[in-house]
Image (cartoon, grey):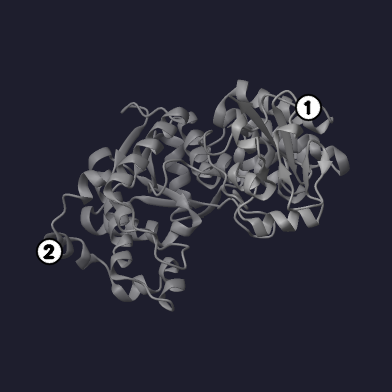
Amino acid sequence: MKNIYDVLMERGYIEQVTHEEEVKALLSKESVTFYIGFDPTADSLHLGHFIQIMVMMHMQRAGHKPIALIGGGTAKIGDPSGKTDMRKMLTPEDIVSNGEGLRKQMEKYLVLDGKSGFIANNADWLDQLQYIPFIREIGSKFSVNRMLTAECFKQRLEKGLSFLEFNYMIMQSYDFLELERRLDCQMQFGGNDQWSNIIAGVDLVRRMDSKQVFGLTFKLLLTSDGKKMGKTENGAVWIDPNKTSPYELFQYLRNVEDADVENCLRLLTFLPMEEVKRLSALEGCEINKAKEILAFEFTKIVHGEEEANKALEAARALFSGAGESSNVPCTEMKKSKFTEGIALLDLLIEIGLIPSKAEGKRLVQQNGILVQDQVVTDFGLVVNIKQFEDDKLMIRKGKKTFHRIQLID
């Protein structure tokens, strides 16, 4: 059986590691407790987060113990890593609510029963800290000169880095120390933008407890041209089906660029590497089969096989020209709203197909909006009840995005 380190390396997850040979040896001989932190800046994980969930699932399947750490404390500061501006400050109530949303999602994908895996919230210890004792004991172990060279701070120094955010590295490092003491946590994992924070935590545990712990980062989910995946013109691609429907999630992955297929199959599915390589080698129209399998497999992981099958059926029905499926994203609206009619651009914004009227006008000018399979040429079009068939209206944006409006009394 392959060492899980080799599995993660082969699939392309691993970017950097503090002590490669020691980590590889440790993972081969015992069950290792490791953690990944998630600041509750929203009440749902998004597609980019799921690389971390996939790593945790791979690790747990190999017998290792994940700690899913909700950053209820660190979210009150805000991680400056990868950000050009200070994060929006959330209320304590929002942080608690968001953390509960993340906890429920993580429990779908990981066993967090206190034996095979754990869930923790750093508010449990960070909220209790007294500032002067903390700075004396922990802050004295950090060199400001060294912190200023960290990648997570560099891009913020020109525009301004608040002292509040400057504390983030110390807080995250302290999390590692607490988890090492509470749960014998030996490793911290994270996205590649967390490298500076992770190595600071490794160093703090060594200084405070004279213990060797380890850090590892994995690749961010990027397109072949270096852009973050999981973003659309309407916002993030969410794991919450109420924010991004299973069909929309399926379609997002079904429509990735050819050059991104192999990377997504490696990182977002559990397909054997032999199958990943076979599918990735397909060319021309055949690559669309690989995209369909990618979309199905990931939707199955996130939402279950039944929802994945529904999304697949909906996509095939629309692609074949059937133009109708109960599984296509749908908005119910009252008939009375259409008695006098609604301006098309207002309607498109209301159902979330466009972010602005300017974008709607651009799409209409490019023949990119269809209502009931008819190309819209007038962005002043008013949609009224006469255009509905059996109380249904299908709107298409571009070639691949469909949305159905269902009238109700």
Give amino acid for label 1: Ala
Q: Is residue 86 left or right of residue 1?
A: left
Residue beneath the point at 23% across and 40% down: 182
Residue behind mark 1 = 317
Task: Quickly name the residue at label 2.
Answer: 132
- Percent position of residue 56, x then y: 47, 37
Q: Judge whether 105 appears above or below 8 on screen.
A: above
Quarter where residue 372 is shown? top right
Secondary structure under badge 1? helix
Which residue occupies 73% across, 23% down?
A: 390
Q: Nearer the viewer, residue 187 or 404?
A: 404
Q: Residue at x 40, y 61 (%)?
A: 87
Residue 120 is situated, as x and y percent measured from the top left of the image, at 30, 39
Q: Is residue 120 visible?
A: yes
Q: Is residue 233 left or right of residue 107?
A: right
Chain-order first, disc 1 or disc 2:
2
